[in-house]
Amino acid sequence: MTNIVNLDSARRKHRQSKADGITLCQSGFHKWQTMAGQRFDVKQGKLVTTERCARCNIERTKLT
């Protein structure tokens, strides 16, 4: 006998797997991780920390 598959649940699972993590970043909930190495901003006299999102690979810099 064959297995009966509910198309609604199959489509929902497929959409969730495609958008896994991306929808969080689009809403502004990034998963920031600091990159190795620290730089120094000479003009402002502060350390510059570079961070990268683990899900969408967007980079940002922060003055600390």
Image (cartoon, rainbow, N blue to C red):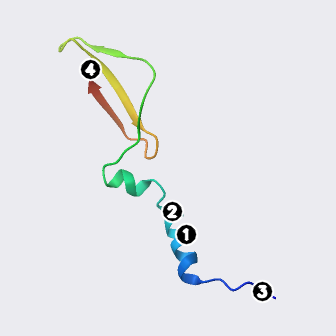
Q: Which of marks 4 and 2 is nearer the N terminus?
A: 2
Q: Earlier in the sequence, mark 4 or mark 3?
A: 3
Q: How far apart are marks 2 and 3 (CA)?
A: 27 Å
Residue under numbered circle 2: 18
Secondary element at image label 1: helix
Residue 64's disc is 4
- Neighbor class of circle 4 (other Cα within 10 Å; few <14, some 14-19, many 20+) is few
Quadrant containing the N terminus is bottom right
Residue that appears at 60% across and 83% down: 6
Determine contact: label 3, label 1, CB under 8 Å.
no
Q: How far apart are marks 4 and 1 (CA)?
A: 41 Å
Residue kind at label 2, given as amino acid type: Lys
- Residue 64: image quadrant is top left
Q: Which of 64 and 42 is in front in this view?
A: 64
Residue kind at label 1, given as amino acid type: His
Position of 37 relative to 29 (above/below): above
Secondary element at image label 2: helix
Residue kind at label 3, given as amino acid type: Thr
Residue that appears at 34% across and 16% down: 39
Residue 21's x, y, as percent?
45, 53
Residue under numbered circle 3: 2
Residue kind at label 4, given as amino acid type: Thr
Q: How far apart are marks 3 and 1 (CA)?
A: 21 Å
Q: Distance between the residues labelled 4 and 2?
A: 36 Å
Residue under numbered circle 1: 14
Secondary element at image label 3: loop
Residue 51's x, y, as percent?
38, 31
Which circle, 3 or 1, is nearer the viewer? 3
